[in-house]
Image (cartoon, rainbow, N blue to C red):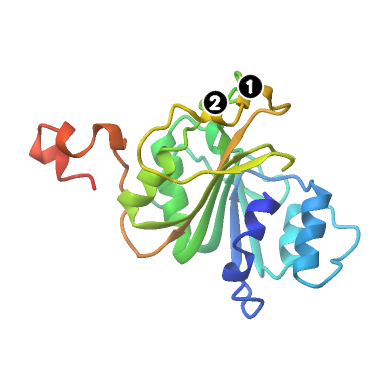
Amino acid sequence: MTIALDSILDEVTCNGKCTPTVVELGNQRLKNNKSRAKMYNKLQTTGTPGLSTTKEFFLDIGFRKYLAIDVNTEMDAVALDLNMDLEKHYGFKDKFDLVTNNGTGEHVFNQYMVFRNVHNLCQVKGFMIHILPFYRWVDHGFYNFQPNLFPCLALQNNYKLHGLWIGTSDGHQIEKLSGKLSRDKGYRNQYNLDSWERDPMIVAIMQKKENNEFSPPQQHLYNNENIASAEISNRYK
C-alpha cells in the first residue's frame, strides 16, 4: 500500500502544502516498515517512532483525517456494510481526498456497490487506490480481478488512470502494465507468474476528474460494434 501511495503522495498532499483526508475500505494493519522508511525519506523526515496504527501513520505523513469502513469498529473504523449504498442506506456522504480499497473489495459480494461507494467517497480531483487479488489467491475471497477491468472502469467514469501494476504484497516483485482496454492473455507467461513466491496482486490508481454519477463499464471485448442494441450501446463508452 505504501508503495502505491508513494507514487501519488506529492499530488495528494500538494507537495506538502495541503493536509488531505483518507478513507480506507477495511481496517488496515500497519506493516511493511521498509516501504514506510522510503516514504519518510522522500518527505525528508525520519517519522515519529513507535507508531502502532495505520491512522497514526497517515497523520504522521501529513493527512489531517483518517477513517476506515468495516463491519466492526476496530482500528479507527466505523461499522458500515459495503454491500449497501453508503449514501442511501446510511446517509454517509463524506468525501475524501484519498480512498483505498486495499485487499477488502474481494471479500464483498456486491462488486457494483464496492466500486460505486469508492466513487462516491472520493471527491473531485481525489485519488482511488485499488489493491486486489489477481492471479492464484485460491479461495482467498469471493473474487479475483483482471487488469482490463480498470482501464474500462476509468474510461466509463472519466477517471484519469495514473497507473496499473501487478506485484506482490511485500513489493519484491512489481511489473508496470500498459493499461490497455483490450484483454491480454499473455501476462501469465510474459511475467512468469507461476514462479512468483507470493500470489500476484493487481494495483490500480485512478483520479476522479468530475462530479459525475458512477457508471458500470462494459468489457471492451463486448463493446461498440459487438452490441446489437442501440439502447445498450448508448450506455457505454
214 displayed left or right of 39: left
Pinpoint residue 201: horizontal percent, then vertical percent.
Answer: 60, 35
Q: Residue furthest top?
A: 139
Residues at marks 2 and 1 touching, judged by CB atoms closer than 8 Å: yes
Give left or right: position of 116 versus 49.
left
Give the residue drawn at x 47%, y 50%.
Answer: 118
Horizontally, residue 20 falls left or right of residue 233, namely: right
Question: Toward the viewer: 31 or 151?
Answer: 151
Q: CA distance from mark 2 to mark 1?
A: 7 Å
Residue under pointer 2: 188
Location of mark 1 (residue): 194
- Residue 64 in the image: state x and y as whole percent: 66, 70
Estimate how packed mark 2 is, as few (under 14), some (14 to 19) or many (20 or more) residues with alpha carbons within 10 Å. Answer: few
Q: State the image quarter where residue 136 is shown.
A: top right
Q: Can you give x and y, in whole percent of width and height, for residue 80 in the image?
A: 54, 44
Element under label 2?
helix
The amino acid type, in three-letter code, at marker 2 is: Arg
Residue 214 in view (yes/no): no
Please provide percent x and percent y for residue 193. Answer: 61, 26
Q: Is residue 148 depicted above or below 18 in this figure?
A: above
Q: Amino acid at mark 1?
A: Asp
Badge 1: how crowded within 10 Å, few (<14), some, or many (20+)?
few
